Amino acid sequence: MRAEIIAVGTELLMGQIVNTNAQYISRGLADIGVGVYFQTVVGDNVQRMKESLRIAKGRADVIICTGGLGPTQDDLTKDVLAETVGQRLVMHAPSMDKIEQMFQARGVPMVESNARQALMLEHSEPLANDTGLAVGVALTHEGTHYVLLPGPPKEMKPMFDRYAKPWIVSRMESVQPLYSVMLKFAGIGESQLEHALIDLIEAQGDTTIAPYAKEGEVAIRLTTRAVSEAEAQTKLQPLEADIRRRVGEYVYAAEDIALEEAVLRRLADQGRTLAVAESCTGGLLSDLLTNIPGSSAAFAGGIICYTNRVKHGLLNVPMEQLEGVEAPGAISEETARMLAEQVLALTGADYGVSVTGVAGPGESEGKPVGLVYVGVAARDGETTVKQLQQFGNRETIKLRSAKSALYHLWKRLNS
Amino acid sequence: MRAEIIAVGTELLMGQIVNTNAQYISRGLADIGVGVYFQTVVGDNVQRMKESLRIAKGRADVIICTGGLGPTQDDLTKDVLAETVGQRLVMHAPSMDKIEQMFQARGVPMVESNARQALMLEHSEPLANDTGLAVGVALTHEGTHYVLLPGPPKEMKPMFDRYAKPWIVSRMESVQPLYSVMLKFAGIGESQLEHALIDLIEAQGDTTIAPYAKEGEVAIRLTTRAVSEAEAQTKLQPLEADIRRRVGEYVYAAEDIALEEAVLRRLADQGRTLAVAESCTGGLLSDLLTNIPGSSAAFAGGIICYTNRVKHGLLNVPMEQLEGVEAPGAISEETARMLAEQVLALTGADYGVSVTGVAGPGESEGKPVGLVYVGVAARDGETTVKQLQQFGNRETIKLRSAKSALYHLWKRLNS
């Protein structure tokens, strides 16, 4: 089944927003085994929208449009599809009721154009909008499947996941559902991981192995079609076991969660708390941790010791260790060790993690960009320090250093 | 002049990466007055790439391709264009020299496929790649302009900005260059700003007014065509003056820099330093500040006081102020004030900024999600605290709170 995604919106063509919808839908279609052959972006223009639909009809089995379902005169997607397939637009009563109720609840008179959001094609199926007002449309016409979704991601994503994907699956010749397992890795690069699994990746058949890499983390998704959960397990388990035999030490979760969430969960399970002393990561490590709801159960806080004055004044690192020709300096194993131990002592946390290094763009203390030390201190154990060499620009080095710190803590929590 | 952007890469169709290149190029083309009518994404497939070029040729004057210029067998964009326009590929000697030198410098033998990156069409112009190895291509054939750019953004962006944009401008009928002014705003929302300027926006003609909003900041770009800088000034200055008369108090820069950079520059100019005490922003404020190279000149560091234990233990807030039925609590004007004053005193900085509030998803201390207090303490002045009500999810509330803290500091630095 060949798919094409058409995103409608002049704001995309002006570069005011990024087409994240295309990525989201592409990934979702990949999950159900539908290949996307083209993505197109077209403005809010009837003639060009028609042309895009005509081209897509010639080369795709399923066409997914996002955008242009709203109440304004610029929202034309339903009108264009209706004209293209020769059907009338009709009112979807439950959607109309919902719109009227919403305006009543707000105590605001309904502007008439809002009724446009309840329109659907006369022979189409409605797709419910759980997070907004514009109803979606699913339609099969002359062998081509059409799906119209809203543009705002917070409306598009639930409609796509809950209603459009199952509808597309119902239209596929093979209706064997997909089962998948996500393995998330830390402490290993994408190319190193691929190298360790290259024979499995090259030999993949019915069960696929897809590596992903983003924002300092690497993941592998194993996917297969099966008639039942049990059959899926018999296909996926040996492969997962083989992968774990090779690179299991780097697996931190068998679900799609960030490393910081895995660390926080493990800490909470153990009833332990964490404090951090951040130099070169400058708050990013704390920011990642506190993006996780409920993080305060295990994350106490920390100190951003960006200058030597703060390393000395708040974290008691002796000035003679930080400065001077013979001194190890702020970027050293000694300082990483002391920062981790001191932040633990000062906050009363069970674990103290430190990061000190050169984020760039220039070198510091005569040390090269990317040189980073990560320290892990434990209330009831020894302090360990790792020396790392990161590559990339300032923000990449900060991110990779923060993830490395989390990884070394993770290793300690599991040792 | 009508443009079409074709991004080449199966990883885009698989949803592994987002097509940020299309946004970047669209915005750059808008800046020089070129309208993008379509964006397309196609995989690494000769037949489908040819089809995309053929369709684009029928509806665009300039076609910009990104991706597929690398060394591997999947990198086919130059081959496809060469076949489409009936030209041979030839070696661009300076690019070849550069590739050979790079391998020599690394002490690694050159894999032969790397030579592909030095290829160009025989009647094309090379576009230099200042940050990578694959040379770009600019070509006019049968009245259509073609530009081939690399896919990795760090190579694409400099090539597009430095070489492709000027080349496209040189191909435009109107060669009056564009001049623009960017005004950046903080402390005012996009809709509020638009409302204040709506008559100017609606009356815009030759000189355009484009509002942008992203990541907690709002910007306006004024753009005009003129034969000279002097003529541009006479067109732009009255408009800028009018805007500043209305909303000038919210303008923090007349160039495209982030608020944190404007704050750091102002601090450095005044020879002052800043320390922060972050509760609900959890490190994000420090992270934003330390993303700016050279931030250590003005940013000393701070304390992530995520728990009451840290607010009390490190920042000396009395427990009876934080906890108890009658206590103001951690999320209060009193605590914001004390956090700002204490972090200033502890670090010896000139300014102390604090943020405490409810990032959500759940309420805290019986206080609603989005309630945030921002404190600003100064070594030689009084402490001010602002109460804010933010909206959005956890990460949005963190970001808007961090930006609000920066804005209130900015106001103080300019008062």
Image: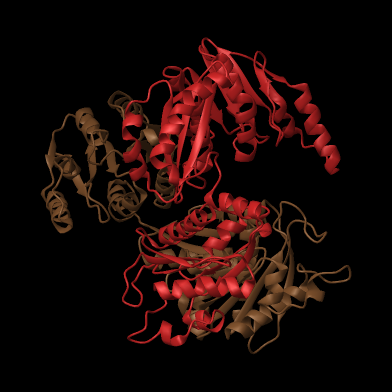
Chain colours: A red, B brown
Residue A336 in the image: above or below residue B78? below
Residue B147 in the image: above or below residue A374? above
Residue B295 in the image: above or below residue A146? below
Residue closest to the eye, B172 or A188: A188
- Classify the position of the C terminus of chain B by image quarter: bottom right
**Residue B272 location (% of width, % of height):** 53, 84
Specify the quadrant of the image occupied by residue B412. Answer: bottom right
Residue closest to the eye, B38 or B155: B155
Instruction: Tell me, yes or no, if residue B363 can be seen here.
Output: yes
**Residue B192 location (% of width, % of height):** 68, 58
Instruction: Tell me, yes or no, if residue A108 can be seen here.
Output: no
For this view, does B363 lie left or right of residue A392?
right
Residue visible at 64% across and 33% down? A158
Specify the quadrant of the image occupied by residue B224. Answer: bottom left
Residue visible at 33% across and 44% down? A191
**Residue A251 location (% of width, % of height):** 47, 44
Specify the quadrant of the image occupied by residue A117. Answer: top right
